[in-house]
Amino acid sequence: AQSVAQPEDQVNVAEGNPLTVKCTYSVSGNPYLFWYVQYPNRGLQFLLKYITGDNLVKGSYGFEAEFNKSQTSFHLKKPSALVSDSALYFCAVRDKDTGGFKTIFGAGTRLFVKA
Amino acid sequence: GAGVSQSPSNKVTEKGKDVELRCDPISGHTALYWYRQSLGQGLEFLIYFQGNSAPDKSGLPSDRFSAERTGGSVSTLTIQRTQQEDSAVYLCASSVTGGEGRGYTFGSGTRLTVV
């Protein structure tokens, strides 16, 4: 079975500081990994994905994520946070080999960026 | 259409009534997904369609929930005899085929409140 854990309900960071939102996953086979963002009163938006290849993937709005197979992690990062990055972030996984077409989402991490 | 459209955006219903939620995916997207987002919870997978077939309906919470898709396009999620625990935001998403490692495009959701 596949699962995703986002260990932090909330992350607080000052504007201009680097940010990290953590995600770990569990799959039987190889993973497709995703990050989505949900801004207030707006729908979920796709941010970035890891399929294969380079472990560091870059996405929208200056975000990036690093796939670490040995630690089964896919943490979201940004070198310099903006107040406008404040939102709810979801990590998601699909098992490439056995998970069919079902993507499992984490519980979400709320990011607050203070000016 | 340009995006995934869901209707209604808000629905308040009395306990015990039936409701229908509609999803109009992006034109040409063969894969369609329903998720549920409860307050403080992550996204809970409900059902996945490939064309008009539903190869995975493992997430439907009970037999009060059903979904169909017609013409490989519009999908309807029906909840019979609604209960207060059904209150949530119901999200629909679509993707080109479902099997590729792409992100989903989500609609804005239907906020269902059962009183």
Image (cartoon, coloured by chain):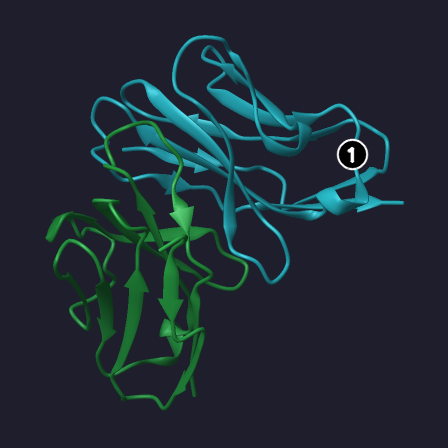
Chain colours: A cyan, B green
User: Where the N terminus of chain B falls, by quadrant?
Assistant: bottom left
In this rendering, position of residue A77 left or right of residue B61:
right
Q: Residue at x 20, y 26 (%)?
A: A98
Task: Please state the horizontal and vertical placement of residue A4, each as a whole percent of the image.
Answer: 43, 35
In the image, residue B37 above or below residue A69: below
Q: Quadrant of residue A65?
A: top right
Q: Residue at x 57, y 58 (%)?
A: A42
Task: Please state the horizontal and vertical placement of residue A2, each as a whole percent of the image.
Answer: 32, 33
- In depth, the one of B66 and A23 nearer the eye is B66
In this rendering, position of residue A26 left or right of residue A44:
left
User: Where the C terminus of chain B falls, by quadrant?
Assistant: bottom left
Q: Residue at x 25, y 37 (%)?
A: B98
Q: Residue at x 76, y 23 (%)?
A: A79
Name the amino acid, label 1. Ala
Residue assigned mark 1? A81
Residue sitting farthest toward the right? A115
In this rendering, position of residue B64 left or right of residue A35:
left
Pinpoint the chain carrying mark 1.
A
Q: Quadrant of residue A17?
A: top right
In the image, residue A94 above or below residue B15: above
- In depth, the one of A85 and B84 nearer the eye is A85
In the image, residue B45 above or below residue B90: above
Task: Please state the horizontal and vertical placement of residue B93, each as a whole percent of the image.
Answer: 35, 51
- In depth, the one of A77 and B6 nearer the eye is B6
Task: Please state the horizontal and vertical placement of residue A111, each as a whole percent of the image.
Answer: 70, 44
